[in-house]
Image (cartoon, rainbow, N blue to C red):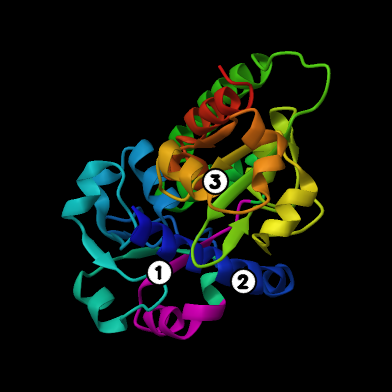
Amino acid sequence: MKWKHIVVLTILAVFALVGCNFQANESNKTGKTSNKVPNRIVSLMPSNTEILYELGLGDKVVGVSTVDDYPKEVKNKEQFDAMNLNKEALIKVQPDLILAHETQRASQGKVLEGLEKSGIKVVYIKDAHTINDMYKTFEQVGEVTGRDKEAKTLVQDTKSNIQDVIDSVPKQKSTPKVFVEIASEPEIYTTGNDTFMNDMLYQLKAKNVFADTSGWPKVTKEQIIKKNPDVMITTSGTTTQEYQQLVSQRSGLEDVTAVKDKQVKALNDDLLSRPGPRLDDGLKRLRDAIYDE
């Protein structure tokens, strides 16, 4: 789990560094110009792979990223390093559609442009900064794969499930302050403003203690102590027991409210770190962790 999370963190770090440059340079290559339904798809982002499977396109997927692990069938697909794409290896699986992430333009743009020149259709799926943005990615994937109707149904179902979770949040006298640790070693990373995870906390009527930052910032132990969260949650791929032990080794954190009240917990990293069809389940688990249910 840890090696996989390091790869995901690397991707997130690149997104944070270059993501702000894409709004002005966004290509019109969204797949609208072609009505051809793809039969061989390569997905370079786990969340997009999960969307494809939910749309009933699992049998069309011939390649995924090295960090893809859900559903279990992806283990049998050809795997590609999303941060170090090999043009020849991608051509070898003969895809007629490659679903890339918009932030890959900066790190992998040269390879992807070369694939487009080879006649392979490349579509850049937009980065989801909020839950509503996630719904748009469902629709975008549906549009370029000829599954518009199924995508709209997926949006409706996911919206309904998420609203049920939001409506079930217990009323509190005060807003719980939450710290989310997405990586622990060698440095601590968290979620800031303008991220779907921050939006999840907002929807659950909780406060992200690092909402005054943006993207996926690196933070220090001293900053966490100063923020004094009521709840500390990690999505770094460890167990609750392992995370509690790690936190206990950070001197000074013993005076933080979350530690004193034993509100230090670990949650499934995939459910919370992927803006995809399972986010409603992730939101439910996040709610339970925050409100100790």
Identify the residue at image location x=68%, y=61%: 219
Tell me if mark 2 has few (under 14), some (14-19) or many (20+) residues whose alpha carbon lies within 10 angstroms of its own.
few
N-terminal label among 3 and 1:
1
What residue is disc 3 on?
248
Identify the residue at image location x=27%, y=53%: 61
Residue 122 at x, y = what percent? Answer: 43, 69
Question: What kind of element bears circle 3?
Answer: helix
Q: Is residue 52 magenta?
A: no
Tell me if mark 3 has few (under 14), some (14-19) or many (20+) residues whose alpha carbon lies within 10 angstroms of its own.
few
Question: What kind of element bears circle 1?
Answer: strand
What residue is disc 2 on?
27
On screen, residue 289 above or below 194: above
Going by the numbered disc 3, the residue's amino acid type is: Ser
Question: What quarter of the picture does the C terminus occupy?
Answer: top right
Front residue of 147/183: it is 183
Question: What kind of element bears circle 2?
Answer: loop
Going by the numbered disc 2, the residue's amino acid type is: Ser
User: Is 178 left, or right, of 272 in this rendering?
Assistant: right
N-terminal label among 1 and 2:
2
Q: Residue furthest left?
A: 76
Which circle, 3 or 2, is nearer the viewer? 3
User: Is 120 left, or right, of 140 in this rendering?
Assistant: left
Which residues, given as a range, are shown in magenta? Answer: 106-128
User: Is 266 left, or right, of 43 in this rendering?
Assistant: right
What residue is disc 1 on?
121
On screen, residue 288 above or below 103: above
On screen, residue 93 above or below 149: below
Tell me if mark 1 has few (under 14), some (14-19) or many (20+) residues whose alpha carbon lies within 10 angstroms of its own.
many
